[in-house]
Image (tube, rainbow, N blue to C red):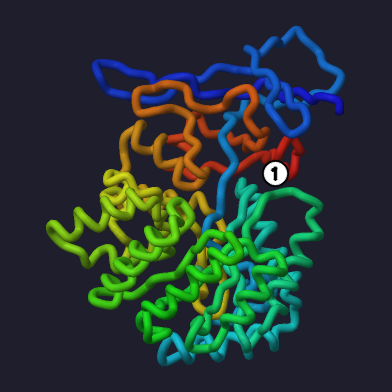
């Protein structure tokens, strides 16, 4: 396979410092050789050279592509005429009416899912983790619809599909449908509030882990429960993770209940989450329930972000720009320094960041997968704080998006 060169892009090499204050990042222009989806060579920009196949990087900054770690491709209403969210008294009423609403839309699930995918791709995403409703009310048809949508992209991104019993694994008798979905291409098992929705946290999580072990898949479960319900859920999750040796394969989305641990119990819970490698995924809600993400990271817990609702039956909001969520995280948690902003990029890149806190260059290296974006920002910190547009995106060496 022939190689291609990306010419003249800027890469961060160190911080700029004066009197102990970091006032920016140093960059230098480079050329990058791409071959078979990998970065095979990185060299200083050589303006006098000419290659058979080359793309002008126009002096733009190169950054890792972004990961959307929590979305619902099956729930998107993008593309249908504006309607605000219909009233619902509670969660059960909401998800019951959701099925009726989505099924009555004039646009197919494939088209709606593609509208969301297109927005995210244009914002630099090359990885999606999407929950897909799988339960008796919808069977496998949402999963199949999203799979058809994805198949039209001819490999422009990586993805994980979560078999998600939105109506409750126990409450809606979804075990069989989830089991089937995991045979049909879903690669994770989901869940939602086993304590309050299923009414039996032990039994619900036992079945979740049973299916996870049977299919050898990770778990990513929605937990909105607070106080005693949240506490019991996290304790049970820890217990089952240990029992099944599922370390590194359990994620909790939202995790509002982590706010409710106090004192020693809080320290112990966060340390245990780190020890059992249970990751937290947040959509950074601004109504006061966002878990203490900085404190969790300081305790060694892996944190990542997702857009979650983007114009669906649950919320009229959401732009489908994961960078906007990271920007909100920065503002909510008061990330202001060059180092803090630079490090925060890791929350939407699967941990890839350009520079360490000490200014060591961490990314990009020869041998890396050639997935990166180009932007007019001067550095990762500016990209996070100012939300610069993505000018171009590359997935495994293929140029998949240009503004
Ligand atoms: Zn969700």
Q: Place residue 59 in its image quadrant.
A: top right
Do we see residue 125 in this rendering?
Answer: yes
Identified at 62% across, 87% down, the residue is 136
Quarter of the picture holding the C terminus: top right
Where is mark 1, residue-wise?
403
Horizontal and vertical percent for residue 91? 44, 85
Packing grade of label 1 (10 A; few <14, some 14-19, many >=20) is: few
- The image shows residue 318 at horizontal and vertical percentages of 52, 65
Q: Which of 281 and 184 is in front in this view?
A: 184
Q: What residue sits 79% from the left and 25% below the top?
A: 4
Front residue of 264 and 106:
264
In this orientation, does residue 85 appear? no
Question: Horizontal and vertical percent for residue 334?
Answer: 29, 47
Q: Is residue 140 left or right of residue 343?
A: right
Q: In this view, does 204 lie above or below 358?
A: below
Is 6 placed left or right of 68 in the picture? right
């Amino acid at each position: 396979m022939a190689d291609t060169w990306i010419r003249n892009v800027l890469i961060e090499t160190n911080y700029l410092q004066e009197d102990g204050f970091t006032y920016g990042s140093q960059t230098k222009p480079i050329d990058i050789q791409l071959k078979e989806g990998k970065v095979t060579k990185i060299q200083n920009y050589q303006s006098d050279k000419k290659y058979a196949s080359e793309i002008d990087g126009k002096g733009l900054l190169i950054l890792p592509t972004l990961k959307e770690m929590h979305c619902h491709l099956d729930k998107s209403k993008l593309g249908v005429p504006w309607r605000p969210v219909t009233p619902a008294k509670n969660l059960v009423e909401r998800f019951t009416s959701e099925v009726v609403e989505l099924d009555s839309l004039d646009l197919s699930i494939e088209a709606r899912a593609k509208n969301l995918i297109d927005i995210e791709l244009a914002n630099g995403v090359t990885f999606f983790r999407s929950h897909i409703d799988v339960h008796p009310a919808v069977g496998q048809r949402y999963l199949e619809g999203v799979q058809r949508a994805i198949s039209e992209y001819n490999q422009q991104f990586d993805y994980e599909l979560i078999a998600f019993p939105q109506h409750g694994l126990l409450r809606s008798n979804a075990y069989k449908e989830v089991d089937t979905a995991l045979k049909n291409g879903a690669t994770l098992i989901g869940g939602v509030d086993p304590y309050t929705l299923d009414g039996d946290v032990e039994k619900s999580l036992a079945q979740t882990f049973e299916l996870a072990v049977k299919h050898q898949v990770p778990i990513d479960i929605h937990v909105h429960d607070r106080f005693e319900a949240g506490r019991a859920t996290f304790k049970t999750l820890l217990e089952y993770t240990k029992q099944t040796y599922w370390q590194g394969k359990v994620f909790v989305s939202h995790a509002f209940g982590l706010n409710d641990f106090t004192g020693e119990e809080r320290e112990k819970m966060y340390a245990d989450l780190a020890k059992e490698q249970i990751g937290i995924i947040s959509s950074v809600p601004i109504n006061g329930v966002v878990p203490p993400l900085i404190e969790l990271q300081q305790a060694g817990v892996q944190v990542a972000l997702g857009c979650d609702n983007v114009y669906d039956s649950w919320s009229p909001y959401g732009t489908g720009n994961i960078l906007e969520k990271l920007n909100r995280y920065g503002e909510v948690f008061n990330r202001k320094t060059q180092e803090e902003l630079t490090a925060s990029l890791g929350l939407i890149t699967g941990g890839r960041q350009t520079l360490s806190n000490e200014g060591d260059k961490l990314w990009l290296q020869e041998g890396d997968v050639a997935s990166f974006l180009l932007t007019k920002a001067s550095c990762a910190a500016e990209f996070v704080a100012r939300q610069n547009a993505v000018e171009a995106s590359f997935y495994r060496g293929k140029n998949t998006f240009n503004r």
